[in-house]
Structure formats: C-alpha cells, structure tokens
Image: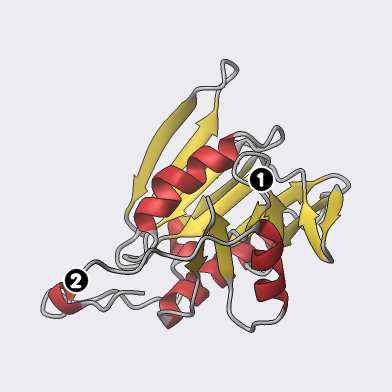
Amino acid sequence: MIPAPKKKYSIEEYIELLKNSDERFEYFDGEIVSMAAGKISHGGIAANISRSIGNLLADRPCQVFGGDTAVKTVKEPPFRLPDVTVVCGEPIIEENQGIEMLVNPILIAEVLSKKTQDYDREGKFMVYQAIESFQEYLLVEQHRPHVTRYIRQPDNQWLRGDFIGLESSVKLESLGVVLPLSEIYRMIKFPTAETDAVVAES
C-alpha cells in the first residue's frame, strides 16, 4: 500500500496553526516539524544557558530570549524558534500575521535531542547562516557535557570548536564572556552506563 503524501502547508496556514495551538511547531519547505515537549533536562539546560548568559551580560545592553521567541529567517521563511537567542543593542522586530519576529540575533543556542539533532546541526544551521547579524551558534548535547560552537569568520566561513566535560568552559566570542559547562549543566543528571542504551527520544 502506498502511503498518503504528507500535507504541504502554506506559510499562512502554518502561522494560523501556531497561533491556535499550545504546541510549538517549525516550518520547513512546506512541512511542519513538531517541537513537542520532551525531557525535563532539555528545558533545564535551555533555562541554565539563558540565566547564565543573562547574568554575564547584566551590565550590558543585551537581552536573552527563550524558546517561544521567533527569529526571522530570510532563507526558508518565515521564522524559527531557537531554544536560546541573544540580541545586543536595540532589538529589531518585524511582524508576520501577528507573530513578532526578531531580525537581529547575534547568538543562537539549540539543545540537541535525538529527534531534532540532525535538523539542528544541518538544515537549521544553514538557514540561520543567512541572518546578517548572526555570529555564533551553540549546539548543546543533553546526555553528556558537550558543547559544539561555531563562530562566523570574516570570509563567512564558520570555525568549529568542541568543549567536553564539566570542567571546561566555552568562550562566547560574539559576546566577550566565558560560559562554564558546569553552569550549562547545573543540576542536570546524565544517564548512567546501564540506562544510556535505553535513553528515550526527546
């Protein structure tokens, strides 16, 4: 039996669905990707990143936004919903069918899960790269202390660095601050060797 083709959504249909649902969705080439709630650790890590960066930037004109904030994407519109977004200076905001979108993020962080990690590492990263103000990307693993950082270079190439272990720290070049992994993973419990093989998708 041939499976029925997936429904293709217009941008207008997607935004109406998003506005009338308590669930988070992202739009990619006519398809809708559910960002449904997963592990508590995912939300805890995102909250730790937001709080820690906010504290580090407390005396500067920067704002940290969470996962409900839309970031406008010129490539593959209309927007994405990153786990953490940082804007320095005056936020530039545009509106699309009643949805406010940030135009000028400087740093974006995504907490990886088994369900969305390929999307975050590849498709979403390519979309974010087209944002002119965007300078730094963090990919944060849930099940072990490992952060991958990408920094935009003057030639628009991206330099990768990996930071592993709770004793490590990642320097956020775009913000001029240092973020310890011990703060990113504060109060997060990692799977044991016995349970690692059966970690549920999140």
Q: Position of residue 39 (x, y in %)?
A: 40, 80
Question: Callout 1 environment at 10 Å: few (<14), some (14 to 19), or many (20+)?
Answer: some
Task: Tell me which numbered mark, 2 or 1, is placed earlier along the sequence.
Answer: 2
Secondary structure under the numbered disc 2 in the rendered image? loop
Q: Residue furthest right?
A: 90
Distance from disc 2 to disc 1, alpha carbons, whole Å, reads 38 Å
Query: Residue at 19% across / 71% down in the picture?
Result: 1
Q: Amino acid at mark 2?
A: Met
Q: Amino acid at mark 1?
A: Thr
Q: Position of residue 163 (x, y in %)?
A: 37, 46
Residue hosting label 2? 1
Residue hosting label 1? 73
Count of numbered circles on the image:
2
**Position above or below: 68 against 133:** below
Q: Is residue 89 left or right of residue 12?
A: right
Query: Residue at 49% across / 63% down in the picture?
Result: 184
Judge whether residue 167 can be spotted in this image: no
Observer-nearest residue: 52 or 105?
A: 105
Q: Residue 161 is drawn in which quadrant? A: top left
Q: Quadrant of the C terminus?
A: bottom left
The disc placed on residue 172 is: none
Q: Is residue 30 left or right of residue 16?
A: left
Observer-nearest residue: 77 or 168?
A: 77
Query: Residue at 65% across / 48% down in the picture?
Result: 77
**Position above or below: 187 against 158:** below
Q: Position of residue 185 (x, y in %)?
A: 44, 67
Q: Residue furthest top?
A: 155
Judge whether residue 54 can be spotted in this image: yes
Q: Nearer the viewer, mark 2 or mark 1?
A: 2
Q: Residue furthest left?
A: 194
Observer-nearest residue: 117 or 79?
A: 79
